Image (cartoon, grey):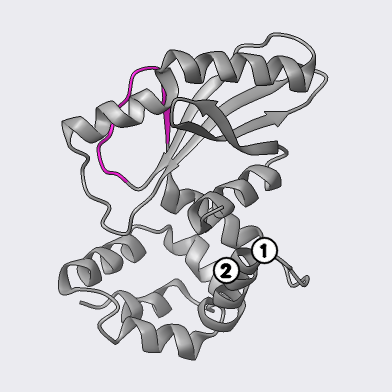
Amino acid sequence: MNPEKRIVTQWLNTHGFFTVSDINAGRNRVIDSIAIRRSEKGDIVWHVEVAASISQATPTKQQVEELEKRFHEPVVEKTMQRKVRELLGKDLPYQNVLVTTARGVRLKEIEIVKFDEVLVDTVKKLDRQNYGDPVTRSLQLVKFLMLSNPKTLAKMLVTDFFTLRKSRRFVRAIESLNPKKVVKKLALPKEKTLDLFFKK
């Protein structure tokens, strides 16, 4: 399982889903994951596919068509129905979910979830226990040794980590935060203390 899929699996698990991954549907189609959350109110079933890239580019028409095939090809839909029946002992409708870094993508009957939001949510929920999975352990190290260390984080932000354009977007994102919440979080004595932080 590649790192992107492992992160999505971790995210699903923290939200109460159990997952079955890498299901061979035949005809060169492999379902990334079936995610199931059991509850007294009714079981929830997702067909989850992951398409992540650091380029975050807008997909071409051909790429969009390929993404839709990952969900809607007859062999995939039949395999999903069969596996749901095997796992739950009954037929249930399921939701199609694409976790992706692609910008502006819209797919027929497919819910889009941003990979960066999944990543942030996963990192936020990590604690200090000893994780055996190398991907989860790597995220844990980044969280507690880099993101949680003010000096290290500051060094990142003053290097070439951000382009000029992204640096400006970062400042705007900080400015858009509720100042009162930021003051409370940082335990600053007065709201005006933020003036230096927001100074242009």
Is residue 189 shown above or below 182? Answer: below
Q: Is residue 106 magenta?
A: yes
Instruction: Check contact, mark 2 vs mark 1: CB within 8 A.
Output: yes
Q: Dot 2, crowdedness within 10 Å: few (<14), some or many (≥20)?
A: some
N-terminal label among 2 and 1: 1
Q: Name the residue under label 1.
A: 126
Q: Which mark is residue 91?
A: none
Q: Dot 1, crowdedness within 10 Å: few (<14), some or many (≥20)?
A: some
Q: Mark 2 points at which residue?
A: 139
- Element marked by disc 1: loop
Q: Quadrant of residue 12?
A: top right
Q: Horizontal placement of 45 versus 166: left or right?
A: right
Q: Which residue lies furthest to the top in this view?
A: 91
Magenta residue span: 102-112
Q: Residue furthest front?
A: 27
Q: In which quarter of the image is residue 35?
A: top right
Q: In which quarter of the image is residue 80?
A: top right
Q: Is residue 65 magenta?
A: no
Residue 185: percent from the left, percent from the top?
Answer: 57, 69
Q: Which amino acid does label 1 sit on?
A: Leu
Residue at (43% x, 23% y) in the render:
71
Q: Horizontal placement of 82 versus 193: left or right?
A: right
Is residue 116 shown above or below 16? Answer: below
Q: Horizontal placement of 18 versus 183: left or right?
A: right
Residue 88: percent from the left, percent from the top?
Answer: 77, 19
